Image (cartoon, helix red, strand yellow):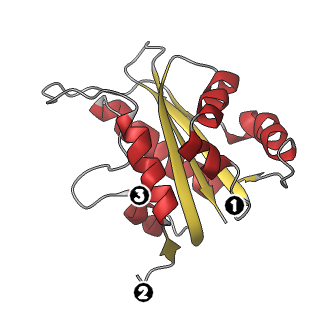
Amino acid sequence: MSDHKFLLSRRSFLGFATASALVPLAACQTVTRTPGKSAGVSASATSIVQNIRSSNGLAGLTADSVLESAALQQAGYMASAGRMSHTTGWGRDFATRVRNNEIHGIAAENIAVGRMELDKLFAMWMASPPHRRNMLDQKFTRYGLAYSEAASGSSQRYWALVLAS
């Protein structure tokens, strides 16, 4: 991958695989869903992120609009597909999304689905070893967080958090 400005660590990849395995997925998808409300919410999560990092002896993270845009793309895809996945289609994996959004350095992604507020979302990620490792990786300095609702009027949200150096 020397021609790319992206480094995906084995640990991050394993975290992705673990995150996908945490939620049962349907064997096939035959209905196309239209996502409901979508929002980038990085600014709303700043105090939670800073508390998590500082309570673990780490510097805070800066909300980043480029990372939030990449997170919003992923959340929207998952809401449209009706399933959690780090891949948005054939040949459109996390590494591709990182390159296409011109995210440089190392990066990782946490995803989730559920009817939850930010405090519960981050508590869930902190309780999961691979997601916790991503949140507490001292190499990361920036983050972007977004969600997309499963369908208009639904309170089921697909969440994506993108972390980068």
- The quadrant holding residue 90 is bottom left
> Horizontal and vertical percent for residue 84?
36, 35
Contact? badges 3 and 2 (CB < 8 Å) = no
Residue 122, label in figure: none
Task: Locate the C terminus and report the quarter of the image it occupies.
Answer: bottom right
- 146 is higher (above) or lower (below) than 73: above
Task: Locate the N terminus and report the quarter of the image it occupies.
Answer: bottom left
Counting the numbered discs, the total is 3
> Horizontal and vertical percent for residue 32?
20, 28
- 147 is higher (above) or lower (below) than 59: above
Q: Which of 9/78 is in front?
A: 9
Q: Is residue 68 left or right of residue 92?
A: right
Neighbourhood count class around disc 1 (C-alpha, 10 Å): few under 14, some 14–19, many 20 upward: many
Provide the residue designation for mark 1.
Answer: 140
How many angstroms separate mark 2 from mark 1 (CA)?
A: 22 Å
Amino acid type of disc 1?
Answer: Phe
Q: Earlier in the sequence, mark 3 or mark 2?
A: 2
Q: Earlier in the sequence, mark 2 or mark 1?
A: 2
Residue drawn 59% across and 48% down? Answer: 68
Amino acid type of disc 3?
Answer: Phe
Residue 131 shows in this picture: yes
In the displayed orientation, state which residue is furthest to the bottom.
2
Q: Is residue 160 left or right of residue 88?
A: right
Provide the residue designation for mark 2.
Answer: 3
Provide the residue designation for mark 3.
Answer: 94
Residue drawn 30% across and 28% down? Answer: 82
> Horizontal and vertical percent for residue 23?
37, 28
Residue drawn 34% across and 57% down? Answer: 93
Contact? badges 3 and 1 (CB < 8 Å) = no
Element class at badge 1 = loop
